[in-house]
Amino acid sequence: MRSSLLLLPVIALALGCSQTVEKTVVYPVSGKVVYGGKAAAGVQVFLAPTADLMPQDAPSNPHGSTGADGTFTITTYEPGDGAPSGPYQILLIWPDNKQEEENDIDKLYGWYDGRYSKLTTIVKEESNIIPTLELPVRNGPPPPIQGIPGKN
């Protein structure tokens, strides 16, 4: 009897700690990246929320990577599951695995990072296909930003 009473706090603690945190609902998102008229393989695609912060239960911002045909699917929790609904800025990085210097790793020269990307999408509460992102060939970085973005 006494050993049963000793187990009671352990059982109560286990029951109290077994609450599961519900994941924010995500919706499928896919698209394609084309650079200079050709499918762009290996481009990292990130969705940065523009209205709200990412849910705290999300391990990272929604992201994906293009395959050989330039297509991608977005992941938040599990591969290809999608993104929470809402508006996003699309950020792109295309690592140049041939370059060894850290400053030269983006084949897109920063044109589609958080400061310069004008690409946007809205994830709706349904399956979402981002229209093909047709990127022009870039031969160098964008001009420096003057003043305060959005204020000048």
Image (tube, rainbow, N blue to C red):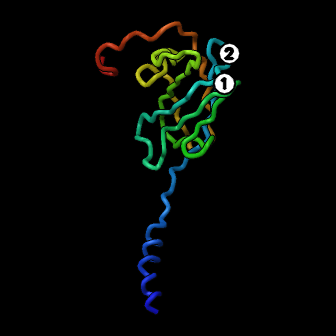
**Residue at horizontal 29%, vertical 16%?**
147
**Sequence-first disc among 1 and 2:** 2
Instruction: Give the amino acid at mark 2.
Output: Lys
Q: Nearer the viewer, residue 96 or 119?
A: 96
For this view, does 113 lie left or right of residue 150? right
**Residue at horizontal 63%, vertical 40%?**
80
Q: Nearer the viewer, residue 24 or 110?
A: 110
- Marks counted in the figure total 2
Q: Position of residue 55 (x, y in %)?
A: 44, 46
**Residue at horizontal 31%, vertical 13%?**
146
Residue identified by numbered label 1: 70
Q: Position of residue 73 (x, y in %)?
A: 63, 35
**Residue at horizontal 51%, vertical 28%?**
90
Residue identified by numbered label 2: 38
For this view, does 94 lie left or right of residue 16? right
Q: Assign a secondary structure to mark 2.
A: strand
Mark 1 surroundings: few (<14), some (14-19) or many (≥20) residues within 10 A: many
Relative to 144, say whether 58 is above or below. Answer: below
Quadrant (top left, top right, bottom left, bottom right) of the C terminus = top left
Q: Assign a secondary structure to mark 1.
A: loop
The part of the image, by quadrant, that contains residue 71 is: top right
Q: Which mark is residue 152?
A: none
Residues marked 1 and 2 touching at CB (< 8 Å): yes
Q: Position of residue 103 (x, y in %)?
A: 45, 16
Instruction: Give the amino acid at mark 1.
Output: Gly
Q: Residue furthest right?
A: 69
Q: CA distance from mark 1 to mark 2?
A: 8 Å
